[in-house]
Image (tube, rainbow, N blue to C red):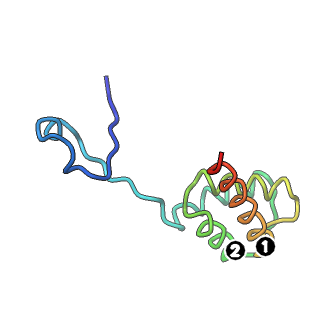
Amino acid sequence: MIFCFASTSTDAIAQPLLQRLHEFVLRKPEVDELLPLVGRVIEGEKIPFQDEAVLKELINLCGRIPRVVLKALEMLAFDGKGISPKTVHGVISSLEIINNGKAKS
């Protein structure tokens, strides 16, 4: 049996328990690590895009969070206008509105 225990403050964990844990440091993927994922999606969905710079901008505006990047790509595919600085900023604005609405409820 495996238990996952996540904490940002390991000094708050009792020493006997801490000795039995394996520490894994998690981080957000870098932009260059997410580009192949974005490439597969835009190729599979046939989403036109201007250049790699706009893809990197999309990834950065999504906070380098794969789930958010995929949601933005889904919205861009549905929109049908392709990936440009204008459409990227429009999708990011929509995602912020959605997230703000969820935070309030």
Image check: 68 left or right of 76? left
Residue 2 location (% of width, % of height): 32, 28
* Residue under numbered circle 1: 84
Q: Amino acid at mark 2?
A: Val
Residue 11 location (% of width, % of height): 19, 51
Work out which quarter of the rendered image holds the C terminus and state it: top right
- Residue at x 60%, y 50% (from the top left corner): 67
* Residue under numbered circle 2: 54
Image check: 78 left or right of 63? right
Mark 2: which secondary structure?
helix
The image quadrant that residue 54 belongs to is bottom right
The image quadrant that residue 20 belongs to is top left
Work out which quarter of the rendered image holds the N terminus and state it: top left
Please identify the residue farthest to the right as the structure is shown. Answer: 80
Image check: 32 left or right of 21? right
Vertical placement of 85 versus 19: above or below? below
The image quadrant that residue 34 belongs to is bottom right
Mark 1 neighbour class, 10 Å CA radius: few under 14, some 14 to 19, many 20 or more: some
- Residue at x 66%, y 48% (from the top left corner): 102
Q: Amino acid at mark 1?
A: Ser
Residue 65 location (% of width, % of height): 55, 57
Vertical placement of 57 versus 4: above or below? below
Vertical placement of 102 versus 2: above or below? below
Sequence-wise, which precedes: disc 2 or disc 1? 2
